C-alpha cells in the first residue's frame, strides 16, 4: 500500500499514481488530503488510486479506510459522494424510481446472472464476506470467488461494492445517459 499526500501539486500527484500503477497493478494507492474536489478524485481514480481519505478525520477513520482498501474496496469520502449525488439529482430528467426493493430473480436472470450468481449477489448486498457466503451456500470460498468474478464481469463493475449496488440501477429500468 502507498499513501500519497494529495494536498499539493495535483499534476505531480497524478504522475506519481500513474508511475506506481505502471510498476505494479496489485499495489493499493490511497490519497490523503485536507479536502478533495470531484475533479481530483475522478482524475486520481482514472490514474489508478484505490482510496481517498480526509486527513482531518479521526485516526480510526484513516485506519478503517486503509483496512478496507487492503481488503480490495475502493473508498471515497462521503463529501465527494454527496457532490456526485447532488449533481446527479440536478441532472435528473425523470423522477427517481423506488430501487429499495430486492430485485426479483426474473429481473436478475434477464440481466444474464445465473440463479446462483443472483443468490450470491444478494448476499453481497447484505455485506456478507466470501467466507460467510461459502458457509451459507455450503461451497468453498474459491467457488464464491469465481462466482463474484463472473458477477463483476457480467455487471461491468470493478468491485464488490459496485456489484452490490448494481441491480438497483441496472435491473429496474433506469435510463442510462
Image: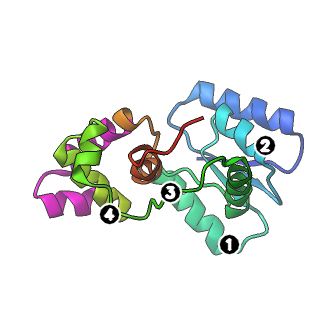
Q: Nearer the viewer, residue 16 or 41?
A: 41
Which circle, 4 or 1, is nearer the viewer?
Answer: 4
Classed neighbour count for the residue bearing mark 3: other residues with Cα under 10 Å, few (<14), some (14–19), many (≥20): few
Query: What residue is shown with label 1?
Result: 59
Q: Position of residue 121 (x, y in %)?
A: 30, 52
Which circle, 3 or 2, is nearer the viewer?
Answer: 3
Q: Secondary structure at mark 4?
A: loop
Is 113 located above or below residue 102 in the figure? above
Sequence-wise, the earlier of marks 1 and 3 is 1
Task: Return the residue found at the far top.
Answer: 22
Q: Position of residue 61 (x, y in %)?
A: 63, 70
Query: What residue is shown with label 3?
Result: 97
Name the quadrant containing residue 27. Answer: top right
* Left or right: 167 in relation to 1: left
Q: Secondary structure at mark 3?
A: loop
Please say if the residues under marks 3 and 4 sit with CB atoms less than 8 Å apart. Answer: no
Residue at 17 percent of width and 46 percent of height: 115
Q: Which residues are magenta?
A: 127-152
* Left or right: 168 in relation to 84: left
Please say if the residues under marks 3 and 2 sit with CB atoms less than 8 Å apart. Answer: no
Sequence-wise, the earlier of marks 3 and 2 is 2
Q: Position of residue 82 (x, y in %)?
A: 70, 60
Which circle, 1 or 3, is nearer the viewer?
Answer: 3
Query: What residue is shown with label 2?
Result: 40
Is 132 located above or below residue 167 in the figure? below
Q: Is residue 82 magenta?
A: no
Q: Secondary structure at mark 2?
A: helix
How much space separates mark 3 and mark 4, taking CA atoms? 26 Å
Please say if the residues under marks 1 and 2 sit with CB atoms less than 8 Å apart. Answer: no
Name the quadrant containing residue 148. Answer: top left
Q: Nearer the viewer, residue 102 or 70?
A: 102
Amino acid at each position: 500500500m502507498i499513501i500519497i499526500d494529495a494536498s499539493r501539486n495535483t499534476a505531480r500527484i497524478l504522475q506519481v499514481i500513474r508511475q506506481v500503477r505502471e510498476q505494479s497493478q496489485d499495489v493499493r494507492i490511497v490519497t490523503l488530503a485536507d479536502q478533495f474536489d470531484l475533479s481530483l478524485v475522478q482524475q486520481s481514480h482514472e490514474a489508478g488510486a484505490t482510496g481517498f481519505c480526509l486527513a482531518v478525520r479521526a485516526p480510526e477513520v484513516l485506519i478503517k479506510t486503509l483496512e478496507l482498501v487492503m481488503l480490495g474496496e475502493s473508498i471515497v469520502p462521503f463529501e465527494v459522494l454527496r457532490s456526485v449525488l447532488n449533481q446527479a439529482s440536478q441532472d435528473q430528467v425523470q423522477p427517481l424510481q423506488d430501487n429499495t426493493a430486492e430485485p426479483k430473480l426474473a429481473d436478475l436472470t434477464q440481466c444474464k446472472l445465473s440463479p446462483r450468481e443472483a443468490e450470491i449477489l444478494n448476499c453481497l448486498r447484505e455485506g456478507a464476506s466470501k467466507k460467510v457466503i461459502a458457509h451459507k451456500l455450503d461451497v468453498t470460498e474459491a467457488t464464491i470467488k469465481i462466482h463474484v468474478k463472473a458477477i463483476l464481469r457480467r455487471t461491468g463493475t470493478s468491485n464488490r461494492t459496485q456489484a452490490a449496488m448494481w441491480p438497483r440501477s441496472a435491473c429496474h429500468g433506469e435510463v442510462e445517459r
